[in-house]
Amino acid sequence: MPLQTHSNDKLDAALSVYEKLKADIIAGALPPDQKLKIEVLRDRYACSGSPLREALSRLTAESLVSQENQRGFRVAAISSDDLRELIRMRKLIDVMALNETMQQGDAAWEEGIILAHHRLTRAPSEISRDNRRDMTWIRSHGEFHRALLAACPSYYLRNFSSQLFDSCERYREILSRVDVLYPRDLAGEHKAIMDAVLARDFDRAPKLICEHMDNSANLVLRTLDA
Amino acid sequence: MPLQTHSNDKLDAALSVYEKLKADIIAGALPPDQKLKIEVLRDRYACSGSPLREALSRLTAESLVSQENQRGFRVAAISSDDLRELIRMRKLIDVMALNETMQQGDAAWEEGIILAHHRLTRAPSEISRDNRRDMTWIRSHGEFHRALLAACPSYYLRNFSSQLFDSCERYREILSRVDVLYPRDLAGEHKAIMDAVLARDFDRAPKLICEHMDNSANLVLRTLDA
DNA sequence: TTCCGACATAATATCGACAAAATTATGTTT
DNA sequence: AAACATAATTTTGTCGATATTATGTCGGAA
């Protein structure tokens, strides 16, 4: 008898497929603008059309998938303009959210950050030897950023932040194709952000977060525009 | 041959059902927390389960519907805390969006506002004699607020604003149950907002918008908390 | 009476099949 | 050979049926 919410592999396929599809899009396994044929996905995720279409509908509302009248679904397209817009929005939203979070955050919130950061340091490197993005790293990275805002009192701020983060993450796939040796210390940035946030440094924390975003975005933009 | 996107009553049922469901939730025809049984909806919207579940999935992502593990869907619950949070967020988002819009707005944007406002003035009154909310007014009201931000350069700001607006609108249904004679000039507020926005008044426009939201919210909150 | 468990009922979530539409391939005409 | 019309194929979107899970009811024991 299951102690936790039991995931009946075949029973709640909708949620399961939603999560897998989302992960594959964010990781770049399903590249931007790729046609999402039901038949192909049916095979890939071992389920029927119905749960697939439900998952795709949800992802459409999250701007990760686009749907055309009678022409099915495809992974949402990317562009440098879109990325610039995303980063601009994330700065606005995350700075607001971070301020509120640092005011309200309690011990449990601090512990969540410590834990998430620890897991991120223990995760495999983002890009594996075969130039594919590591799912564990991606998940840990997302969890770390969500943990920073976990104590944010506004459901909507958390939600918007999370959505923008996910939309941004899939741009990182580009960095795995050109094997650029990281000209920056990603782990160090995470550590610095954590320290500033835990210290409730209302000046440094938002500044570091914004720089963190800009660094990633600029790297991607250089590759995209080239 | 259709000039515009043709809605083939039975062909793209998914989109059609999505819009109708959304409209019914916003209008309050489907009240908060109401169970959404597939069988009942199947009958109400004259279609089968599949397009329904797709629409419900999309609405779940928009926070208008909630879904529980194996227990189906229901209309998202409301609470005074949620409304306060919504208003707080709308002020943040809409003020940012409005500033950008007033900087970038062109002639077509201005004409869109004029037209939407005209239609709103010509719409039937919000609440009809039988204490039900008028669909035409609701649609016109939404179109007016969207028109104000139509020239906003950020897709995400427009999207968030629109989503928060929709979530707020369904709180207005409460005002139709207690027949409170409007102690304020709703039409006048809309007119004043339009004038300030068209005049590119960067001081008054955001102030009026915020007051507009507060007025509606306070009216609802008084009724909710009573 | 109140609580617990087995049974009956209802609802959900998924599947496979079908009909409508779009896409590709083919053939015909200029 | 290019362009258009037509036919074949693929793909989408919807339906009805079914198995699984949740809910409600009834009877019996503490």
Image (cartoon, coloured by chain):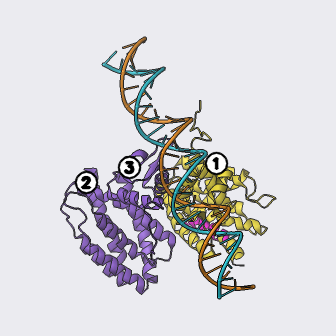
Chain colours: A yellow, B purple, C cyan, D orange
**In the rendered image, the vertical position of residue B156 relative to residue A15, given as above or below:** below
What residue is disc 3 on?
B43
Residue C14 place in picture, x, y as percent: 57, 45
| Quadrant showing the C terminus of chain A | bottom right
- Give amino acid for label 2: Thr
Residue A217, percent across and down? 65, 71
User: For residue B96, what is the image quadrant?
Assistant: bottom left
Query: In the drawing, what numbered circle is on residue A115?
Result: 1
Please provide the residue range marked out in magenta.
A203-216
Indicate which disc, 2 or 3, sits on the residue closer to the N terminus: 3
Q: Nearer the viewer, residue B127 or B191?
A: B127
* Disc 2: which residue: B223
Please tell me in which quadrant of the rendered image residue A174 appears: bottom right
Q: For label 2, count other residues whose C-alpha is less than 10 Å away and answer few (under 14), some (14-19) or many (20+).
A: some
Drawn side of residue A63 relative to residue A134, left or right: left
Foreground residue among A119 and B122: B122
| Residue in view at x 41 percent, y 70 percent | B94
Front position among marks 2 and 3: 3
Q: Give x and y (percent) for residue A202.
A: 53, 63
Q: Are marks 2 and 3 in contact (CB under 8 Å)?
A: no
| Mark identifier at residue A80 | none
Residue A201 visible in this rendered orientation of the protein: no
The amino acid sitting under disc 1 is Leu
